Amino acid sequence: MNGRSTTLHGLVDKWLAPDHAAPARIMRLTRDEAGPHRCVRVEVCRPSRTLSMLFFRHRDGSWQVFPPQRSRPCMNAW
């Protein structure tokens, strides 16, 4: 990450550019039962088309447009 906290609001403004005529709506909230990961689908309905994107919450608390990397089993040898 770039050192700044990436908020969901900031990403929605950047990628979907909602306004009063076409507000952003959260259409789906998914929580990962195996960990603290969350996925949100946000939609903006415009006169010409509907825009929809998925945003993913990462372990550091930031939101990104890509899913967090899963922790994988590992084996250590001493």
Image (tube, rainbow, N blue to C red):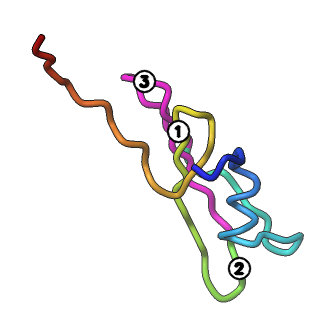
Task: Give the residue drawn at x 48%, y 33%.
Answer: 37
Q: Earlier in the sequence, mark 1 or mark 3?
A: 3
Task: Give the residue drawn at x 85%, y 71%.
Answer: 19
Please state if 31 lies on the left or on the right of 34 as rendered.
right
Residue 75 circle label? none
Residue that lies at the very extreme toward the bottom in this rendered image: 48
Q: CA distance from mark 1 to mark 3?
A: 10 Å
Q: Which residue is mark 3?
A: 35
Between residue 39 and residue 7, name the one nearer to us.
Answer: 7
In the rendered structure, does residue 48 fall within the stretch colored magenta?
Answer: no
The kind of residue on which mark 3 rests is: Gly
Q: Earlier in the sequence, mark 2 or mark 1?
A: 2
Q: Give how far across and how far down residue 40 sits, in percent.
A: 56, 47
Q: Which residue is mark 1?
A: 58
State whether residue 45 is above or below residue 8. below
- Tell me the quadrant of the picture where the C terminus can be found: top left
Q: Which residue is mark 2?
A: 46
Residue 12 image-quadrant placement: bottom right
